Amino acid sequence: MTEVRTARPPYFRFFGSFLVASAPTVCFDGSVTSTSISMGKAHRLVGYIVALLLASLFYVTWFTVANRTPGSDVTILFRIGIAVFFWAFGGIAAALVLMAIPWAFAVVWIKRIGQFGSVYWLLLGAALTVLFGCGASSLAPKPDFIEDQTFSQGFVIALQRQGICLLLMGLLFGLTYWYLSERGRAAGSVQDL
């Protein structure tokens, strides 16, 4: 059996928000292509977007259910609207978008620190979501009747009020990303970095 070598060494390219390795691949018919690696990039991007949407849906659902009052005349649509408002302007949407930068580095660094499978992505999703979610909530604009607070005071208040929700949201985010994007890579597929 002969050893198959690529025509040139791998190089790094910026794809969306993910820095990924790209190298030509030799196909069964002898032609050289990089489509199998680019499909891995697309899977990562789709995995991140689906995880972001699922985590956002979880946050809106949590907020809607947690803020219900028994015997109230408030409709479910109004509560969902308030939840979407707080998701968009309370810092959670900004946190999920800003998470793309460290997440891209995590995708690159997974090869260097070893293969931990779903545990790596679960813990990373939870840690980044809590960190960025509480930070963005602390920096989000507040109404005038709320006292001024420092960043650290706002971070602690956000952690006390939304900590469990953000932790579970991050675990769901990490699990969804791992399931859609990285699950097949653990077995050593062609699309590895």
Image: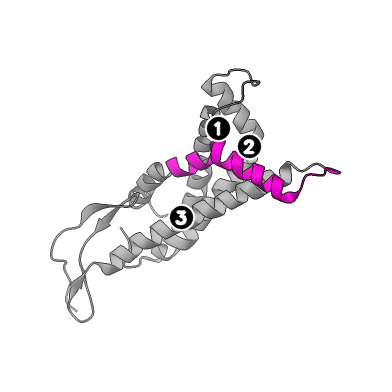
Q: Quadrant of the C terminus?
A: bottom left
Q: Would residue 171 be counted in the magenta stretch?
A: no
Disc tally is: 3
Q: Crowdedness of circle 3 by 10 Å Cα count: few (<14), some, many (20+)?
A: some
- The answer for how far apart the CA atoms under marks 1 and 3 are is 21 Å
Amino acid on which the number 1 mark rests in the picture: Ser
Amino acid on which the number 3 mark rests in the picture: Ile
The image quadrant of residue 160 is top right
- Residue 90 appears left or right of 63: left
Along the line of sight, which residue is nearer the eye, 7 or 134?
Answer: 134
Q: Crowdedness of circle 2 by 10 Å Cα count: few (<14), some, many (20+)?
A: some
- The answer for how far apart the CA atoms under marks 2 and 1 are is 9 Å
Element at badge 3? helix
Q: Which mark is residue 146?
A: none
Q: Is residue 148 visible?
A: yes
- Residue 2 appears left or right of 62: left
- In the image, residue 35 sits, relative to residue 90, either above or below, namely below
The residue shown at (53%, 36%) is 91
Q: Position of residue 93 (x, y in %)?
A: 51, 42
The residue range painted magenta reads 70-98
Q: Where does label 3 land, which residue?
A: 49
